[in-house]
Image (spheres, grey):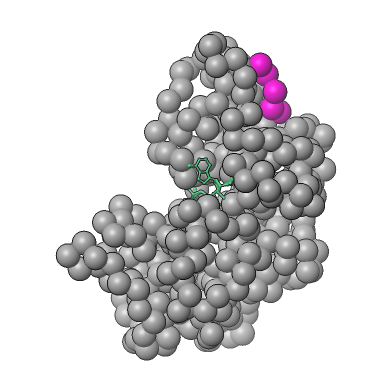
Amino acid sequence: MRALVITESDGEVTLSVDEVAPHGFDQDDAHVAVEYSGVNFKDAMVAAARSRVRRVPRVVGGVDAAGTLVEPFGALPAGTAVAVHGGGLGVERDGGFATEVRAPARWVSPLPEGLSPRAAMIVGTAGWTAMASVVALEHHGLAPDAEVLVTGATGGVGSQAVFYLARRGYRPIASTGSPDAAEWLHALGAAAVIGREDVSDRPDRVLASERWDGAIDCVGGPTLAQVLRALRHGAAVAASGLVASADLPTTVYPFITRAVSLLGIDAVEAPTLQRARVWEEVARTVRAGDLEVFVDREVGLGELGAAFDDLRHGRTRGRILVDPRR
Ligand SMILES: NC(=O)c1ccc[n+]([C@@H]2O[C@H](COP(=O)([O-])OP(=O)(O)OC[C@H]3O[C@@H](n4cnc5c(N)ncnc54)[C@H](OP(=O)(O)O)[C@@H]3O)[C@@H](O)[C@H]2O)c1
């Protein structure tokens, strides 16, 4: 198979597009012909030197992929459209930046009707995480016209969070460090676009004014701390990321005086039922063709190095789609 191989030796990382034999899989794994993969922030972290995310010195990258089953798998016939993501895919096991991928059952989700492999990879792990965040806030109890803050709004998770929230009747407030993307964010459904620094007020106080009925944060660090200060009484933030920092410099006051909740979102070890449920919710929320607005660009395996750089420097809008046959 043709694949992007990431190799680290003496602290130097090499990316090469090679013909390689699949390895490191179990006989009972699903065998998938990949049609599309997508570039996630985690992929860029895997491809970095001295990566704390990559667990092996050599791996085929790609934390997600979608395509069709080459052979029957459990109750699923050959040809079934599936998405594969999570676990150690593209981190310690050969991943989706390849023409073929093999994965155990718990990482494989049959795609609901109406969601093609291409559409599923425009959604990708980032969009799955966005929808899982929306579903978590709804379980917590989101009022129908709730005003929901989304941080990192032009990114993979953030932009789809804005879109899904708007489609489900809420009022997404997009916080971004890219003011020139305001028009795009409004087109996705943002009710308002604010700067990164405008998430909360009253920097001299422990708590800010109560502003948000809910929030979706993939930025972490001081941003998540500001979100917690500004949530309304009883509101929740669904937290999934750490682009700013893994540290959380906060106090207990939002939790003990405003009954605020911090809901953790994890796409990697999500159980099979949750995976399927979230894909269903995506299919229920979007119409065919809707998702093209999220395509930053489409690349082949040889263009992934530049794509990782763009992601690391926040130069993307939405999702970079990967066609491994290119
Ligand atoms: N928990 C999970 O299972 C899970 C799943 C998927 C992703 N994630 C995590 O979620 C995060 C986002 O992933 P993604 O694929 O959406 O990444 P992405 O496409 O790079 O988007 C991140 C966005 O955050 C904003 N940003 C970048 N650097 C920033 C900084 N220093 N301070 C504040 N904002 C900054 C930018 O948006 P603006 O310019 O609009 O501000 C950027 O577009 C990553 O940490 C990723 O690892 C976690």
Q: Position of residue 203 (x, y in %)?
A: 55, 16
Residue at far front of view? 180
Q: Is 182 placed left or right of 322 in the picture?
A: right
Which residue is located at x 31 percent, y 56 percent?
51
Q: Is residue 234 magenta?
A: no
x 55%, y 75%: residue: 299
Q: Is residue 23 above or below residue 93?
A: below
- In the picture, which quadrant includes the C terminus? bottom right
Query: Picture coordinates of residue 304 (x, y %)?
Result: 46, 71
Is residue 292 in view from this perspective?
yes
The quadrant where residue 255 appears: top right
The residue drawn where x is 34% and y is 55% is: 53
Q: Position of residue 162 (x, y in %)?
A: 71, 46
> Position of 262 compared to 25: left or right?
right
Closer-to-camera residue (250/87):
250
Residue nearer the viewer, 5 or 130:
5
Residue at 37% x, 88% y is 19
Q: Quadrant of residue 115?
A: bottom right
**Is the residue 145 above or below the residue 228 in the image?**
below
Q: How many marks?
A: 0
Q: Which residues are magenta?
A: 209-213
- Quadrant of the frame with the N terminus: bottom left
Indicate the quadrant where residue 123 lies.
bottom right
Q: Magenta span: helix, strand or loop, mainly?
A: loop
> Is residue 259 visible from the viewing direction of this image?
no
247 sits to left or right of 33: left
